[in-house]
Image (cartoon, rainbow, N blue to C red):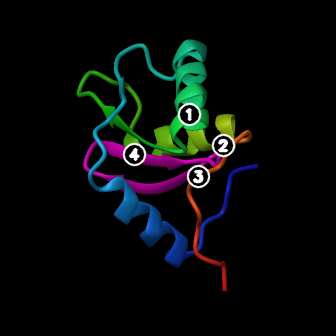
């Protein structure tokens, strides 16, 4: 089950994510188990990460977002250009406080 964000929460995360640089690049190997494992580790450590899709990838941005969100139970806060902004609160020590869903 993926995390559902309200518009207000997504805007908050986009603001936090704006200065971030992509931590991973998705290329021709696609969404391999190793890639998904690395994304999961980065989400646990950082909570909010950017992933850049390279030109040689066979998957499009929207589909990559859906598959990553389903596999890792995270939220896609933004899809822009060739970049995904992903959010998942840390299980051990969450630092990002989302605005209330109201």
Q: Give, as a single range, the part of the protein colored magenta.
A: 74-89
Q: Are marks 2 and 3 in contact (CB under 8 Å)?
A: yes
Give the mark, 2 or 4, whose residue is nearer the N terminus.
Answer: 4
Circle 4 sits on which residue?
Answer: 84
How far across and down, in percent of the image, does residue 5 sit? 60, 66
Local SS, label 3: loop
Q: Residue at x 58, y 67 (%)?
A: 98
Residue 77 lies in the magenta stretch: yes
Q: Which mark is residue 34?
A: none
Foreground of the two, 55 or 39: 39
Q: Are marks 4 and 1 in contact (CB under 8 Å)?
A: no
Q: Which mark is residue 45?
A: 1
Magenta region, main secondary structure: strand
Circle 3 sits on which residue?
Answer: 95
How many angstroms separate mark 2 from mark 1 (CA)?
7 Å
Foreground of the two, 80 or 19: 19
Local SS, label 1: helix
How many angstroms separate mark 2 from mark 3 (CA)?
8 Å
Give the mark, 4 or 1, whose residue is nearer the N terminus.
Answer: 1
How many angstroms separate mark 2 from mark 4 (CA)?
18 Å
Q: On the rendered structure, is 15 left or right of 47? A: left
Circle 2 sits on which residue?
Answer: 90
How far across and down, in percent of the image, does residue 32 sit? 54, 16
How far across and down, in percent of the image, does residue 34 sit? 56, 13
Give the mark, 2 or 3, whose residue is nearer the N terminus.
Answer: 2
């Amino acid at each position: 089950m993926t995390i559902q964000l309200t518009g207000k929460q997504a805007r908050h995360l986009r603001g936090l994510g704006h200065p971030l640089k992509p931590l991973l690049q998705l290329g021709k190997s696609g969404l391999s188990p190793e890639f998904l494992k690395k994304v999961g580790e980065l989400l646990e450590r950082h909570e909010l990460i950017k992933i850049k899709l390279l030109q040689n990838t066979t998957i499009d941005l929207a589909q990559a977002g859906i598959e990553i969100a389903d596999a890792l139970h995270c939220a896609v806060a933004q899809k822009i250009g060739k970049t995904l902004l992903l959010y998942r609160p840390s299980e051990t020590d969450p630092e990002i406080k989302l605005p209330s869903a109201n």
